[in-house]
Image (cartoon, helix red, strand yellow):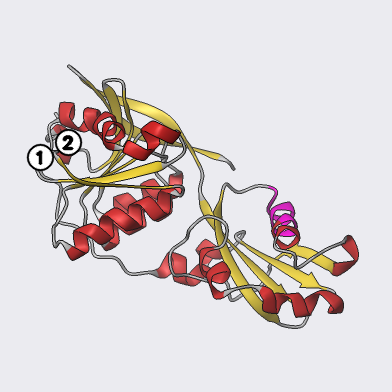
Amino acid sequence: MSASHRRARGLRLDTLAAVNDDIAVEEPLEMRLGDGRRTLRSVVTMRTPGADLELAAGWVLGEGIVRCVDDLVSVRACTDRSLLPQARGNVVTVDLAEQALPRLAGLSRATDITGACGVCGADSLAAVMGRQLEVLAPAVPLLDPGVVMALTDHLQEAQRVFARTGGLHGAGVTDATGTLMAVREDIGRHNAVDKVLGWALMAPAQPTALVVSSRASFEIVQKAAASRVPVVVTVSAPSSLAIDLAESAGITLVAFARSGRATAYTHPARVTGPAD
């Protein structure tokens, strides 16, 4: 399934409305690389479920582990009965031919950790899904809806390198008034988020909101939760797993924040006040 149906609250300049929304599904995929008898390396990537065997085959090809079809013995869904319930359907086993096995040594530790998309500090599915995060305090009104809807515009205005190149993501953190305290840019959205949250850690400062010029992915919400930032605002769509994590971590997740509108998917009271 590549989309799921969610309930949310739509924010407009002068109205609030309950809305139904279709959300792209995001789940982790663990790829276990081995010789048919044992797993030698394990890599986790976030993806939309579907064509997982092809994804794994393409990944080992792109990494240079497999150079031709003869290097690939099999690619199959893992049926290990010891898998956690949330891991079932999310683990693929890649069995390599003998001549391909030495190439596993060429995989850096960084490749194991980040996979294809920036999953932070985890090289197994259990580590990604089982990380314990502090649940933030119950939602209370913090930011005016009008302020929230303008945050991505303010972020773009502050992106000086993006203005020249059009090629960088931006991430910013705000204080309790919604004023940007710091903005950082990077070719990768995860790097931009790491930079600005690193600034907050070293300042030190405790941001009220994290604003990102991208979609709301699992990793971005995870980074906000680790930094105890209660509000995440993004310019584009959230994934299903980002919504689930934000809900469980007590984070207010606001997406599609642009052109005088936004959609609050979790804990909306921080930006709208209590529901009627």
User: Which residue is painted at 23% across and 43% down in the image?
Assistant: 267
Q: Relative to 76, is 244 on the left or the right?
A: left
Q: Quadrant of the N terminus?
A: top right
Q: Quarter of the image holding residue 109? A: bottom right
Outermost residue, top direction?
14
* CA distance separating discs 1 and 2: 6 Å
What amino acid is labelled 1 in the image? Pro
What amino acid is labelled 2 in the image? Val
User: Which residue is painted at 57% across and 68% down in the image?
Assistant: 111
Q: Position of residue 166 (x, y in %)?
A: 44, 33
| Disc 2 packing (10 Å; few <14; some 14–19; many ≥20) | many
Outermost residue, bottom direction?
37
Q: Which mark is on residue 141?
A: 1
Question: Is 265 situated above or below 38?
Answer: above
Pointers 1 and 2 in contact (C-beta within 8 Å): yes
Q: Relative to 150, is 258 on the left or the right?
A: right
* 226 within the magenta span: no
Q: Position of residue 104 (x, y in %)?
A: 70, 76
Find the magenta span and give its range: 51-58
User: Which residue is painted at 28% across and 29% down in the image?
Assistant: 153
Q: Considering the numbered disc 1 on the image, is that residue within a helix, a strand or a loop?
A: loop
Q: Position of residue 188 (x, y in %)?
A: 45, 49
One can see residue 240 in this view? yes
User: Which residue is painted at 20% across and 33% down in the image?
Assistant: 148
Q: Nearer the viewer, residue 69 or 192?
A: 192
Q: Nearer the viewer, residue 7 or 153?
A: 153
* Label 1 vs 2, first from the N-terminus: 1
| Disc 1 packing (10 Å; few <14; some 14–19; many ≥20) | few
Question: Is 150 situated above or below 46?
Answer: above
Question: Is 72 situated above or below 264?
Answer: below
Q: Considering the numbered disc 2 on the image, is that residue within a helix, a strand or a loop?
A: helix
Q: Which mark is on residue 271?
A: 2
